[in-house]
Amino acid sequence: MTPRIAWHRVLVTVVVVFLALAVVFYALSVFLAPADGRSTAGLFVGWAMFAMIGAIGFGIVDFFVRPLGGRSGDADVIAAAEEARTGSTRTQQAR
């Protein structure tokens, strides 16, 4: 596995964790608002917004880190399968 793919997987995991935290914090703010008042609900909504901003930030970083097109590991697998099927990795050009 290339370092680029490893970083992509780590960043996607971080984004998913931040999104899950945002949902949990928002749900806690809704459930705790009647019992503990507006200050507690506001605190959890603030944490939910922080988690959402973190997910967006790491998602933007992941956009520039993720493997693209022919540089991905999948391209090597597809080329190997094509070579095994046809004996060549060349593709036909549209005329």
Image (cartoon, helix red, strand yellow):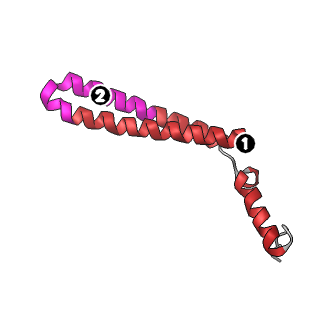
**Which residue type does callout 1 highlight?**
Thr
**Looking at this rendering, what residue extends furthest in the top direction?**
39
Above or below for 7 versus 39: below
Q: Is residue 90 left or right of residue 8?
A: right
Q: Quadrant of the N terminus?
A: top right
In the structure shown, which secondary structural element does the residue marked by tag 2 occupy? Answer: helix
Q: CA distance from mark 1 to mark 2?
A: 38 Å
Characterize the local packing of mark 2: few (<14), some (14-19) or many (20 or more) Cα atoms within 10 angstroms. many
Measured as percent of width and height from the top left, residue 66 is found at 65, 44
Q: Which mark sits nearer the N-terminus, 1 or 2? A: 1
Quadrant of residue 77 within the rendered picture: bottom right
Lateral position of residue 9 relative to residue 45, left or right: right
Depth order, front residue of 44/11: 11
Where residue 48 appears, as percent x and y from the top left, is: 35, 32
Q: Which residues are magenta?
A: 31-53
Residue reaching furthest left?
35
Q: Residue at x 76, y 54 (%)?
A: 70
Count neighbours of disc 1 (C-alpha within 10 A) and say few if under 14, some if 14 to 19, many if 20 or more. few
The residue at which mark 2 appears reads as 44
Residue visible at 54% across and 42% down? Answer: 12
* Main SS category, magenta section: helix
Q: Amino acid at mark 2?
A: Phe
Would you say residue 44 sits in the magenta stretch? yes
Residue beneath label 1, please? 2
Residue 30: within the magenta?
no
Camera-side residue of 75 and 53? 75
Point 77% across, 57% down: residue: 76
Task: Name the front one of labels 1 and 2.
Answer: 1
Q: Residue at x 34, y 39 (%)?
A: 23
